[in-house]
Image (spheres, helix red, strand yellow):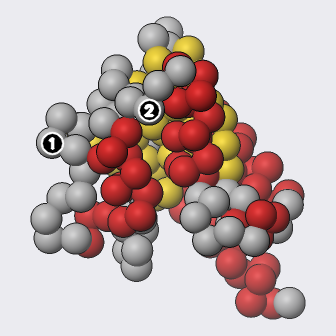
Amino acid sequence: MFTDEYFMRKALNEAHKACEKDEVPVGAVIVADNRIIARAYNLTETLNDVTAHAEMQAITIAASYLGGKYLKECTLYVTLEPCLMCAGALYWAQITRIVYGATDTKRGFSLNPSSPLHPASTVTSGILETECAALLTNFFRKKRRL
């Protein structure tokens, strides 16, 4: 049986790929009908593009796969709470569900007093939170030592 934890582990695999490329380790997968239709991770350093967040990459891949811009009946699994930019893109994509691991206490969309998400979107937080947060914490700890 596919669970939120199962798909979040797939997103964590993507985050580890980002870490290997010295990118901030955030990974994402988009699921439709219990099938992963998009896998992505942060590419902001690689592409020299501040918008190349894991969620943005995953949205583009999923839309291409589906042949349309709307991600209705899709779920995004992402290791870190989406920022306001990504939340806005998820709004326009009309994604049905967002599941994230670690809370982003500095730039997460939930800091915004009015929800930037589509009214039909639902959110589940804290899935594998400890593992998701630890990956980020360890990444930045190593960066500070260099």
Label 2 – label 1 distance at C-alpha: 17 Å
Q: Which residue is mark 1?
A: 119
Extreme residue in the front direction: 68
| Residue type for callout 2 | Lys
x, y percentage for residue 107? 40, 74
Residue positioned 86% across, 90% down in the render: 146
For residue 36, what is the image quadrant?
Answer: top right
Q: Is residue 43 left or right of residue 62?
A: right
115 lies above or below 76? below
x, y percentage for residue 117? 25, 50
Q: Are marks 2 and 1 in contact (CB under 8 Å)?
A: no
Residue positioned 53% across, 21% down in the render: 67
Residue positioned 46% across, 50% down in the render: 101
36 lies above or below 86? above
Q: Nearer the viewer, residue 60 or 2?
A: 60
Q: Which residue is mark 2?
A: 69
